[in-house]
Amino acid sequence: MKTSIIFFLMLPFLGLSQNMNNDKLQEIYTSVSDSIQGQSGAWRFYIKEVPLMCITDTNHNRMRIISPIADSNTVSEELFKAALVANFHTALDVKYAVSDGVLWSVFIHPLKELSEHQVKDAVSQVYYANINFGSTFSSTSLTFPGSINSEKEEEPKEEKQELRKL
């Protein structure tokens, strides 16, 4: 009896696979951007002069939306630390990352499982994480408890020092 009830409660969720694909992504990016270039699976588009890119790998069901922020060699250690804190509190579904000497705002996700709403939200978060780097470091107005400004460097406690030896 319990199994039957659980099955019926989960039934509405079993068919939620979104089947996102490159054609749908192209439509979404065209609708939200000021301009777009590229081909299926590799686009460069702009929102208010901020460049964003999307790369997909349909064979491995992966996609990423990225936006270059700065040459990583010019970013101070203080800003890097603040970005790591933001990855926990204010960047939410996007993260700050470094690759090939560039600091990026990045959203990475399985492709097929995305809905149109999630893609639009991801584009928005990548955009805002880019333009808010160095100030609020936020991708939305939502933050998790704590903040970049409340993070203080403190002397490592004895336990932390012992863990570092491992």
Image: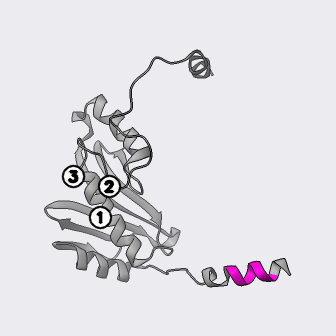
| Amino acid type for the residue under numbered disc 1 | Ser
Which sits in the foreground, 53 or 7? 7
- The residue shown at (56%, 17%) is 161
Q: In this figure, which residue is indicated by the disc labeled 2?
A: 139
Report which quarter residue 38 is drawn in: bottom left
- State yes or no: residue 43 in magenta: no
Report which quarter residue 26 is drawn in: bottom left
Q: Which residues are magenta?
A: 4-9
Circle 2/circle 1 CB separation < 8 Å: yes
Q: Residues within 10 Å of mark 2 (few under 14, many from 20)?
A: many
Residue 60 against residue 133 in the figure, above or below? below
Residue 67 against residue 161 in the figure, above or below? below
- The residue shown at (18%, 66%) is 46
Q: In this figure, which residue is indicated by the disc labeled 1?
A: 124
| Amino acid type for the residue under numbered disc 2 | Ser
Distance from label 3 to label 2 (Cα)?
9 Å
